[in-house]
């Protein structure tokens, strides 16, 4: 039975209370971070930085994010940790938006930064607004409320603040509930082309009436695509395409050159766009069929084309009126989208392979991590009887979906075995890993850019050696998660902490700790942290010492740099922090060093885990091969022989499989057979899933 808004509110409130306690954060911070994470995951915003500022003269702000395309998101909270679900009036909404608008106006027109403490987050934001006044083309004012709107208003009319076009968005409890409980796990874009552009867009049906889905060929005016991207930005792009654009630049110079110098040849030169939708509305016009509306348009290939059209129009004032782009649109039922959309994107991107773009939730890396998280029990903490699991959410909404059909008693058991604070997502994993193994600036650049970096790195490493990703890797990742979250709590508790830059301090603290131990050819004992399921007092003390040094460094940027959060995103910031490593190493207590393990010892553990994974892979391959009867292998053999697709080696191994169960292929042969099976599927030979 579906939850009511009241039930959702009470569950959400308990989640916030538990999260605030676990993370050592204020409830307001936890509320803003929790809702913002939802919006980042679904592409509504690209990132989020906390920044609380209230003034008696009608100004308030609680968070912000500048994207790379001239859009500023300003967030304001309606939160008082209420015990019961209450209603939010339009008058209160208007007042909240007025206060956050006043903050922007004061930053632009009244020099607000000069009145603020230079090490405070609000100074950093006010200064950035002033410095970027000519670059900001759009403001999104976003209200997060723990109440529910008393009317059905979901968005307010667009206005201007300080002369800049401004949109208003309200995320109340009802809207958050809808987003979490929807099948697609995100609010779909509902586009009305007649309302937006005055008419529909001509299309040609490319499906038969008996097909399971509809598809259309369209010729999209470049002006329409650029305008859609201007209005909706990354929300228009399927998640993996957003990742691709984070990993690459926004403007493809070849596309830009064609737009500027050979617009008439754009259609001929460009590969076009592949997109999906949940549903479309069409009408018959004098010139044929036209699409007049689309629900949940998602570009799964061609994101760079779309972004480049927008940027070239904006930066170069390019005329797009003579440019058209071919688009293949597939209408995919939302229930099929998780399985089908990644495949469409994967196959559409084969001409331009990028590891980050291929790093779907269905990528075998994520599937393996999910398998570990459902199978491996975490040791019971001291004094506790029950072991628990760390729930890896490889696809958005899995944690909620796993409970949706359970009885109340089964739900209680599920939550006891999989506590909410032990759920982590792909972007969480990327944070936990990159601070130790990559440049910490990526974490400071926001979860989307950081995940893009992680995806490219892990995608490449998986291609070389998938056995590196084994039980040890999973346990180490969880240990790093425990340390990361403990560091957030430790930083918040320090007497010098003033409520700002916690994410930056945490990232550089752990990266500096990694550098200090690596210089000694040692490492934190991650398996020890996994076994204890907590960070002990010795490691906590070391983290507190290092974080203090990091804080002192980042709040004192070099002369000429006044913006601390921007400074934290630069290579030079990490270079300067690393200079403290040698002196800081002498300040850390001897007990800390006594707990470290040598890199040689860790390498031996990794080798053992890699060998075990190789055995597991072989056993799994044999299981899959044995599940397919000999007659089916004979049929596959015949079909591939007819198409002349088999090598002599593959032919011999297939003949072994044709003798099952009398003759069993070796583990290595089974790996080859699974590759043959995939080849047969790619050839469309009607091979079923094993």
Image: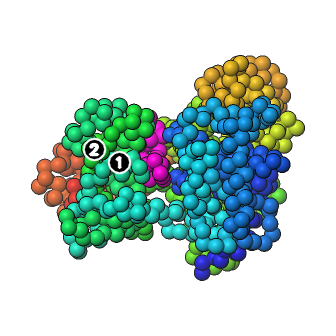
Residue drawn at 58 percent across, 53 percent down: 159
Neighbor class of circle 1 (other Cα within 10 Å; few <14, some 14-19, many 20+) is some
The residue where tag 1 is placed is 223
Q: Residue furthest bottom?
A: 1
Q: Vertically, is 158 above or below 560?
A: below
**Magenta segment:** 229-249
Residue drawn at 13 percent across, 53 percent down: 643
Point out the image quarter for the N terminus: bottom right
Query: What is the x, y in percent for residue 88?
Result: 71, 68
Could you say which disc has been placed on residue 664 in the image? none
Point out the image quarter for the C terminus: bottom left
Q: For the residue labelled by badge 1, is the local secondary structure a helix, a strand or a loop? A: helix
Label 2 with label 1: CB-CB less than 8 Å: yes
Query: What is the x, y in percent for residue 207?
Result: 23, 67
- Residue 269, image quadrant: top left
Q: Is residue 520 visible?
A: no
Query: What is the x, y in percent for residue 178?
Result: 58, 69
The residue where tag 2 is placed is 323
Neighbor class of circle 2 (other Cα within 10 Å; few <14, some 14-19, many 20+) is many
Q: Main secondary structure of the magenta part?
A: helix
Residue drawn at 37 percent across, 41 percent down: 309
């Amino acid at each position: 039975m579906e939850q009511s808004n009241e039930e959702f509110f009470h569950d959400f409130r308990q989640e916030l209370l538990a999260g605030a306690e676990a993370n050592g954060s204020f409830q307001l911070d936890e509320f803003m971070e929790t809702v913002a994470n939802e919006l980042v995951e679904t592409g509504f915003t690209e990132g989020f930085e906390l920044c609380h500022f209230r003034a008696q003269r009608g100004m308030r702000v609680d968070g912000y994010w500048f994207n790379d395309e001239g859009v500023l998101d300003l967030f304001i909270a309606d939160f008082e940790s209420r015990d019961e679900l209450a209603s939010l009036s339009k008058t209160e909404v208007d007042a909240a938006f007025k206060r956050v608008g006043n903050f922007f106006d004061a930053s632009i027109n009244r020099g607000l930064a000069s009145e603020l403490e230079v090490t405070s987050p609000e100074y950093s934001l006010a200064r950035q607004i002033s410095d970027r006044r000519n670059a900001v083309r759009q403001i999104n004012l976003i209200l997060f409320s723990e109440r529910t709107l008393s009317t059905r208003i979901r968005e307010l009319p667009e206005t201007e603040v300080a002369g800049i076009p401004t949109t208003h968005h309200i995320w109340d409890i009802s809207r958050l509930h809808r987003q979490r409980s929807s099948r697609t796990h995100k609010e779909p874009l509902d586009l009305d082309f007649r309302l937006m552009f005055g008419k529909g867009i001509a299309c040609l049906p490319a499906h038969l009436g008996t097909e399971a889905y509809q598809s259309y060929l369209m010729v999209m005016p470049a002006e329409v695509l650029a305008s859609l991207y201007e209005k909706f930005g990354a929300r228009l792009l399927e998640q993996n395409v957003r990742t691709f654009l984070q990993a690459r630049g926004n403007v493809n110079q070849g596309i830009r050159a064609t737009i500027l110098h050979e617009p008439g040849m754009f259609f001929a030169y460009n590969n076009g766009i592949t997109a999906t939708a949940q549903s479309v509305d069409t009408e018959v016009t004098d010139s044929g069929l036209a699409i007049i509306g689309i629900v949940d348009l998602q570009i799964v290939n061609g994101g760079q084309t779309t972004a480049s059209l927008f940027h070239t129009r904006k930066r170069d004032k390019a005329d797009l009126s003579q440019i058209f782009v071919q688009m293949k649109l597939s209408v995919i039922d939302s229930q099929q989208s998780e399985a089908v959309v990644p495949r469409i994107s994967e196959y559409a991107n084969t001409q331009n392979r990028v590891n980050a773009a291929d790093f779907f939730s269905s990528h075998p890396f994520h599937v393996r991590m999910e398998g570990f998280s459902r199978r491996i029990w975490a040791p019971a903490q001291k004094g506790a009887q029950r072991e628990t699991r760390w729930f890896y959410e490889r696809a958005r909404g899995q944690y909620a979906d796993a409970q949706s059909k359970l009885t109340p008693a089964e739900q209680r058991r599920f939550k006891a075995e999989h506590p909410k604070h032990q759920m982590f997502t792909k972007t969480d994993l990327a944070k936990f890993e990159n601070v130790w193994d990559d440049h910490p600036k990526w974490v400071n650049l926001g979860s989307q850019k950081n995940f893009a970096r992680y995806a490219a790195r892990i995608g490449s490493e998986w291609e070389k050696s998938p056995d590196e990703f084994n039980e040890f890797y999973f346990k180490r990742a969880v240990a790093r998660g425990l340390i990361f979250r403990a560091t957030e709590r430790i930083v918040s508790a320090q007497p010098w902490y003033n409520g700002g830059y916690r994410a930056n301090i945490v990232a550089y603290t752990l990266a500096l700790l990694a550098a200090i131990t690596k210089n000694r050819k040692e490492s934190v004992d991650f398996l020890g942290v996994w076994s204890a399921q907590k960070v002990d007092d010795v490691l906590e003390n070391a983290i507190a010492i290092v974080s203090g040094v990091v804080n002192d460094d980042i709040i004192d940027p070099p002369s000429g740099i006044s913006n601390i959060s921007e400074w934290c995103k630069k290579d030079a910031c990490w270079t300067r922090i690393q200079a403290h490593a040698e002196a800081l190493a002498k300040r850390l207590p001897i007990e800390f060093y006594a707990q470290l393990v040598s890199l040689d010892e860790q390498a031996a553990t990794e080798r053992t885990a890699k060998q075990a994974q190789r055995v597991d892979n072989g056993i799994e391959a044999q299981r899959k091969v044995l599940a397919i009867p000999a007659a089916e292998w004979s049929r596959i053999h015949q079909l591939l022989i007819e198409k002349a697709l088999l090598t002599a080696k593959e032919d011999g191994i297939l003949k072994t499989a044709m003798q099952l169960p009398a003759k069993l292929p070796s583990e290595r042969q089974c790996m080859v057979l699974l590759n043959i099976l995939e080849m047969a599927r790619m050839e469309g030979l009607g091979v079923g899933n094993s």
